[in-house]
Image (cartoon, coloured by chain):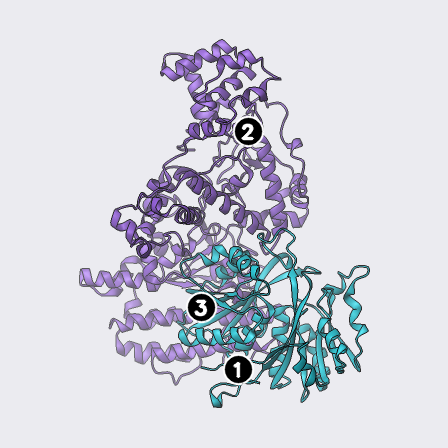
C-alpha cells in the first residue's frame, strides 16, 4: 500500500519561520473572501520574497466586485513580477494558453499554490497540469481555514456556496477509465450541502457508497452539521460513514488508498464536496490513480463571499510524483 | 435479536445499482396490475414499432427496462432450462428477442462537449463511442450464450468471429473474449482522449472509426447471417435508458437510429416526460415523429383510474418487507398494517379543537348569530359542526340544518335532506372542512395512511418508497418496539415523513439544472394560490389544486422552456386527456401540481376536478419571475355559475 508520510505545517509556525526561504513562483486566485490574501500577508510579514506571482483573475469574480471590495488587495503585497491570467472559473482550459506561454515560471522552479480561493475543479486542473505538462515533482500548497462559513439560512439548513442550478460533471482531466464489469464505488467527501451529495449519488449510481465526514473539523459543530445535512444519504443501508481529519489531505489520500486496495478492481468515483484540504487529498489520490474518476457539481456562478474571517493557514508539501520503490514516500 | 434482524425495508432504491438477481427479486410486473392500457407484455419484443417509455423520476422506468435486459432474462432462461429441460435460447425465442440495456451515465454524456472542440467533431466521437458500447453489449450476450454451449462452433469460429473482427478492424482476433478486449481497447481510446483534452489541443485519432449503425446494426446482421440460433425472427432490442440526459447532438444520433431500425432491430427508449431536446437527426433536415418512428407509453398517470396502482404499491412494499427477516418471520408484510388504510379525519378534528372548542364559533360570529351556531353545534364531531355552519352560510335555516344532520346520523336515507347531508359530508366536503378547521385553528393538517401516501406519490413509485422510508426511519428512532413488534407507525411519525419528503422535493426543484429557480418560484406561487382556495371558509372551490393554461402560448421562450422542464421533472403533471376546466367551459389541457408538494402548502392530495384555476401566459411568467406573488387576484370572490354538485367522489376511493 502506498502511503504518504505527510508534512503539513502552520504557516506561522516558528520552525517554518526559521527555514523560510524565498518562493520562486506563487500561484494565487484573486477573490473577495477575507482569507484570499491571508497567506500572502503572513509570508510578507515574515519577509519572505515572492519572485513570480501568477494571479488568476476570473471574469465571473470581476463582474461581482463591489465598492470597497478587498478584491484588489493583493497589490499591497510586493512581488517582483505579477503575471495576471484572465480566464473563466467554469472553464479551466481557458487558462491553458496563458500558462503555457509563462511556463518558464514553472519548469524547474519551486512552485507554491494557494488554493484558498480557487474552486476545487480549478486547482485539480492546475495540479494535473503542473504534473503532466510542467513535469513538477512536488509543490507546496497553502490553505487558509475560514473562521466560519456563512450560513444565511441557519446552520441546520443547507449551506450553499454556489448560485443557481448545478451541473454535475467530471472534473476536466479526471474522467478515469472504467473497465468492463467493474463495480462502481462512490466516495463522497461530505460537505454541508446534502442535496448535492444526493444528486451525485443518483448520477454516478454506484453499488457502494463511502461517505467521508471531516472529523475533527475546523470546529466541533461542523461534523454534526455535515451529518445532519447529509442524513438522507448516510441513512441509506448501502452507505458506510468513515471519518478523516478535515484539514489533512494526507489522511484522505491514505483512506482512499485503503479503499482502493480493499475493493481491488473497482471503478472508484470521488466527489470532493468537503473541505479543500480533503479535496486536495482526493486530488493527490486521483493523480496517482488515473483510472479513478472525480466528479463535482459545477454551478452557474459562485457566491462572492462564503466564509467569515480566517483561522489557521497551512502549508502542505504535495508530491506530484510518488517514488514507490521504498513502499511509501513523503516529501 | 431485534437489532440484528431489522433494517429499513425501504432504503436502497436505485434500480440502476441493483444487481441482476435483485431486479428479479424486486420486480413487480406492472402488466399484472393493469397500469398500462397502451401496451401488452409481449409488445416489448414483438411490437414492430419502436417504443418510447416516458415518465418522471422514480417512476420505475429503469427497473422496467433492466428487467427485459439480457443478463436478467438470462437468469430466467437458465431457470427455464432447468425446469423445462430446454435450451436457454429456446427461452429467448419464446420471448421473441434479446434486450440490450444501454445506459451511458450523464457525467460521461456531458463530457462530450466543450474544450474548444466543435460540436460536429464531438458528435462523431460520440457516435463512435456509442457504437462501441452497443457492440460490446451484443458480443457479451453472444459469449454468454456460447458459454451455455448453444452456438455452433464452426459457425462461430469460421464466420461470426472473423466477420466481426474485420468489422472492428482487427482480423487477428480469434475468439469472443478477444473481440471483447478489442472493443474495450477502442472504448479506452475514447476515455483517454476525454481525460487528455483539457490539457492538450489535439485531434481524436482512433485506430479505427465507427459510423452510426456500423456496429449497432452491423453485428446483429452478421449474427443473423452466420449463426443458426439467430436465424429466425428473434429480435435485437436496444433498451436505451435516460435518453433525456443525452445532449442535443447525442439525441440526434439516437433519433437517427430510431428512423432506420429494421424488422430485426428495435429500440425501446426510457426517458423523462418532455425528454426530447430535439427531434432532428444527424445529417439531414429530416426529423422523427410520434406515430411514425415510435409510439409513446406514459409511465406516470396523473389519475389513479382504479385500484391497480394501489395494489401495485402494496406488492412493491410486500417484496421489500419480505426482505427484512423479522417482518418475514412475523408475517408483517402488508404495508397497510403499518400505515393504516386511511385517515381518521374525525379523530384528527377532535384533537385539533380539544383545547379551544369555541374558537369555531368565535371565528364565524360576525357572519352568523351565536344562537344559530349553538343550535347546530356537534361537539363530538367538529367537522359536522363546521358543515352545519357552511349550510347556514349558504342560507339554510338552523332548524333545517339540524334536522338533516340528525337524520343523517340516524341513517334515515328515506329523508332527502339526510341524503343531501351525507353527500355533502362524505362525498364532497369532509376533507375541505378539515383544511378549513386547520386554517381556523392555525394548525397543520396531518398527512398519513396508505391511501394518503399513495395519493401523495402522484403515480411516482419512488415517491411512495421515499415516504415509507422516512416513516420507517422516524418509527425506528422514536418507537422501535412499536414498529418491529407491533407493525405500527403512528400518524405523527408518518406526518413528519410526509412533511420531510414534501419539503425536500420542493427544495430539489432549485437544483434542477435548467430553469430550476423559475420552476421553484412557479411551484411556490402556485401552491400558495391553491392554499388560499383551501382557506376559504365558504368552500366555494373545494380542494382546488389544478390549473389550466394554453402552454403553447407561454412566452417568453425561457418561461415556455421552464414550463416544459416543470413537466419533465414532474413538478406539474399534465392530465392525460383534455378536460373541461369548469362545467360549461371548453376542453383544455389541465395540469395538476405534483401532490408530493401538498403537505408543504397544506392543500388536498386528491384531484377532485371541480375547478381549475385559469392561468394566462402572463401569469406563468409572473409566477416564474417573482417570489410571493399576491394570490388574491387568482381566487374568485364569487362562485362561477357552476353546479359543484355534479362533482362527487369518495373520500378514500376512486377519483
Q: Nearer the viewer, mark 2 or mark 1?
A: 1
Neighbour class for label 3 at 10 Å: few (<14), some, many (≥20)?
Answer: many
Label 1 belongs to which residue? A5
Which quarter of the rendering shows the C terminus of chain A? bottom right
Vertical comparison of A151 with A276: above or below:
above
**Residue B304 visible in image:** no
The correct choice, above or below, for A257 with respect to B280 in the image is below
Q: Are marks 2 and 1 on the same chain?
A: no
* Disc assigned to residue B441: 2
Residue A173 sits in quarter:
bottom right
SS assignment at label 2: helix
Colour for chain A in the figure: cyan
Give the CA distance from mark 3 to mark 1.
Answer: 26 Å
Q: Determine if marks 3 and 2 fall on one subunit.
A: no
Q: Chain of mark 2?
A: B
Give me the chain letter of mark 3: A
Crowding at dot 1, Cα within 10 Å, few <14 / some 14-19 / many 20+, comes out as: few
Q: Chain of mark 1?
A: A
What's the distance in space between the residues labelled 3 and 2, CA to CA? Answer: 50 Å
Q: Decide: is B387 above or below A331.
A: above
Q: How many marks?
A: 3
The colour one sees for chain B in the rendered image is: purple
Amino acid at each position: 500500500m502506498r502511503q504518504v508520510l505527510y508534512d503539513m505545517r502552520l504557516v506561522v509556525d516558528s520552525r517554518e519561520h526559521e527555514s523560510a526561504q524565498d518562493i520562486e513562483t506563487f500561484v494565487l486566485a484573486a477573490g473577495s473572501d477575507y482569507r484570499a490574501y491571508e497567506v500572502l500577508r503572513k509570508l510578507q510579514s515574515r519577509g519572505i520574497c515572492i519572485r513570480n506571482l501568477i494571479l488568476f483573475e476570473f471574469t465571473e469574480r470581476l463582474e461581482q466586485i463591489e465598492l470597497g471590495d478587498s478584491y484588489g488587495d493583493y497589490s499591497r503585497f510586493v512581488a517582483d513580477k505579477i503575471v495576471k491570467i484572465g480566464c473563466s472559473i467554469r472553464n479551466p482550459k481557458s487558462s491553458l494558453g496563458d500558462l503555457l506561454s509563462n511556463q518558464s515560471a514553472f519548469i524547474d522552479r519551486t512552485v507554491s499554490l494557494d488554493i484558498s480561493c480557487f474552486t476545487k475543479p480549478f486547482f485539480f486542473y492546475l495540479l494535473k497540469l503542473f504534473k503532466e505538462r510542467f513535469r513538477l515533482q512536488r509543490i507546496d500548497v497553502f490553505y487558509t481555514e475560514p473562521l466560519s462559513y456563512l450560513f444565511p439560512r441557519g446552520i441546520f439548513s443547507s449551506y450553499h456556496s454556489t448560485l443557481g442550478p448545478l451541473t454535475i460533471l467530471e472534473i476536466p482531466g479526471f474522467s478515469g477509465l472504467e473497465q468492463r464489469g467493474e463495480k462502481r464505488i462512490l466516495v463522497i467527501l461530505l460537505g454541508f450541502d446534502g442535496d448535492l451529495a444526493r444528486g451525485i449519488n443518483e448520477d454516478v449510481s454506484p453499488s457502494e457508497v463511502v461517505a467521508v465526514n471531516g472529523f475533527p473539523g475546523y470546529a466541533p459543530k461542523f461534523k454534526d452539521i455535515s451529518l445532519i445535512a447529509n442524513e438522507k444519504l448516510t441513512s441509506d443501508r448501502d452507505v458506510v460513514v468513515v471519518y478523516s481529519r478535515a484539514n489533512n489531505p494526507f489522511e484522505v489520500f491514505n483512506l482512499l488508498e485503503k479503499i482502493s486496495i480493499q475493493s481491488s478492481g473497482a471503478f472508484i468515483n470521488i466527489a470532493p464536496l468537503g473541505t479543500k484540504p480533503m479535496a486536495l487529498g482526493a486530488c493527490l489520490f486521483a493523480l496517482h490513480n488515473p483510472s479513478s474518476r472525480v466528479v463535482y457539481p459545477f454551478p452557474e456562478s459562485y457566491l462572492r463571499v462564503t466564509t467569515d474571517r480566517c483561522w489557521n493557514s497551512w502549508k502542505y508539501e504535495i508530491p506530484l510524483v510518488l517514488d514507490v520503490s521504498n513502499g511509501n514516500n513523503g516529501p | 435479536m431485534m437489532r440484528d434482524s431489522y433494517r429499513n425495508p425501504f432504503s436502497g432504491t436505485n434500480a440502476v445499482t441493483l444487481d441482476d438477481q435483485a431486479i428479479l427479486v424486486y420486480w413487480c410486473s406492472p402488466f399484472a396490475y393493469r397500469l398500462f392500457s397502451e401496451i401488452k407484455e409481449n409488445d416489448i419484443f414483438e411490437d414492430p414499432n419502436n417504443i418510447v417509455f416516458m415518465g418522471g423520476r422514480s417512476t420505475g422506468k429503469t427497473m422496467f427496462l433492466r428487467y427485459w435486459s439480457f443478463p436478467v432474462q438470462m437468469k430466467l432462461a437458465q431457470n427455464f432450462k432447468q425446469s423445462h429441460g430446454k435450451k436457454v435460447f429456446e427461452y429467448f425465442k419464446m420471448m421473441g428477442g434479446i434486450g440490450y440495456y444501454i445506459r451511458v451515465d450523464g457525467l460521461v454524456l456531458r463530457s462530450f462537449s466543450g474544450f474548444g472542440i466543435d460540436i460536429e467533431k464531438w458528435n462523431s466521437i460520440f457516435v463512435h463511442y456509442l457504437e462501441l458500447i452497443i457492440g460490446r453489449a451484443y458480443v457479451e450476450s453472444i459469449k454468454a450464450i456460447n458459454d451455455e454451449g448453444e452456438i455452433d462452433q464452426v459457425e462461430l469460429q469460421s464466420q461470426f468471429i472473423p466477420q466481426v473482427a474485420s468489422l472492428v478492424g482487427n482480423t487477428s482476433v480469434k475468439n469472443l473474449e478477444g473481440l471483447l478486449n478489442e472493443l474495450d481497447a477502442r472504448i479506452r481510446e475514447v476515455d483517454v482522449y476525454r481525460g487528455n483534452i483539457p490539457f492538450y489541443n489535439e485531434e481524436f485519432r482512433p485506430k479505427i472509426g465507427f459510423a452510426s449503425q456500423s456496429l449497432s446494426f452491423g453485428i446483429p446482421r452478421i449474427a443473423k447471417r452466420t449463426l443458426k440460433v439467430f436465424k429466425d425472427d428473434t429480435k435485437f432490442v436496444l433498451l436505451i435508458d435516460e435518453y433525456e440526459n443525452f445532449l442535443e447532438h447525442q439525441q440526434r444520433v439516437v433519433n437517427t437510429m430510431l428512423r432506420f431500425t429494421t424488422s430485426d432491430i428495435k429500440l425501446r427508449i426510457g426517458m423523462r416526460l418532455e425528454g426530447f431536446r430535439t427531434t432532428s437527426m444527424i445529417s439531414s433536415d429530416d426529423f422523427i415523429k410520434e406515430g411514425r418512428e415510435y409510439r409513446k407509453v406514459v409511465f406516470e398517470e396523473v389519475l389513479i383510474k382504479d385500484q391497480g396502482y394501489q395494489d401495485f404499491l402494496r406488492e412493491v412494499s410486500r417484496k421489500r418487507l419480505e426482505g427484512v427477516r423479522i417482518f418475514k418471520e412475523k408475517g408483517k408484510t402488508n404495508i397497510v398494517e403499518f400505515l393504516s388504510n386511511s385517515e381518521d379525519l374525525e379523530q384528527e378534528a377532535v384533537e385539533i379543537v380539544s383545547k379551544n372548542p369555541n374558537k369555531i364559533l368565535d371565528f364565524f360570529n360576525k357572519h352568523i348569530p351565536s344562537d344559530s351556531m349553538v343550535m347546530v353545534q356537534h361537539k363530538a364531531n367538529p367537522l359536522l359542526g363546521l358543515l352545519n355552519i357552511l349550510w347556514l352560510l349558504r342560507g339554510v335555516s338552523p332548524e333545517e340544518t339540524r334536522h338533516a344532520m340528525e337524520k343523517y346520523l340516524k341513517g334515515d336515507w328515506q329523508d332527502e335532506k339526510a341524503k343531501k347531508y351525507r353527500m355533502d359530508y362524505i362525498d364532497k366536503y369532509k376533507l375541505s372542512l378539515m383544511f378549513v378547521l386547520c386554517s381556523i385553528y392555525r394548525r397543520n393538517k396531518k398527512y398519513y395512511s396508505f391511501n394518503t401516501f399513495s395519493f401523495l406519490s402522484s403515480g411516482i413509485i419512488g415517491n411512495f418508497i421515499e415516504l415509507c422510508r422516512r416513516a420507517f426511519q422516524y418509527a425506528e428512532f422514536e418507537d422501535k418496539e412499536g414498529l418491529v413488534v407491533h407493525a405500527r407507525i403512528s400518524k405523527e411519525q408518518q406526518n413528519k415523513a410526509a412533511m420531510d419528503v414534501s419539503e425536500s422535493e420542493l427544495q430539489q426543484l432549485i437544483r434542477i439544472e435548467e430553469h430550476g429557480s423559475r420552476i421553484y418560484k412557479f411551484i411556490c406561487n402556485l401552491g400558495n394560490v391553491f392554499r388560499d382556495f383551501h382557506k376559504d371558509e365558504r368552500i366555494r372551490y373545494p380542494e382546488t389544486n389544478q390549473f389550466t393554461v394554453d402552454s403553447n402560448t407561454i412566452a417568453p421562450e425561457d418561461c415556455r422552456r421552464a414550463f416544459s422542464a416543470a413537466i419533465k421533472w414532474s413538478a406539474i403533471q399534465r392530465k392525460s386527456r383534455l378536460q373541461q376546466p369548469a362545467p360549461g367551459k371548453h376542453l383544455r389541457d389541465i395540469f395538476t401540481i405534483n401532490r408530493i408538494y401538498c403537505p408543504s402548502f397544506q392543500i388536498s392530495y386528491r384531484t377532485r376536478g371541480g375547478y381549475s384555476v385559469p392561468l394566462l401566459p402572463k401569469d406563468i411568467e409572473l409566477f416564474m419571475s417573482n417570489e410571493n406573488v399576491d394570490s388574491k387576484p387568482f381566487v374568485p370572490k364569487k362562485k362561477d355559475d357552476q353546479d359543484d354538485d355534479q362533482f362527487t367522489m369518495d373520500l378514500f376511493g376512486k377519483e
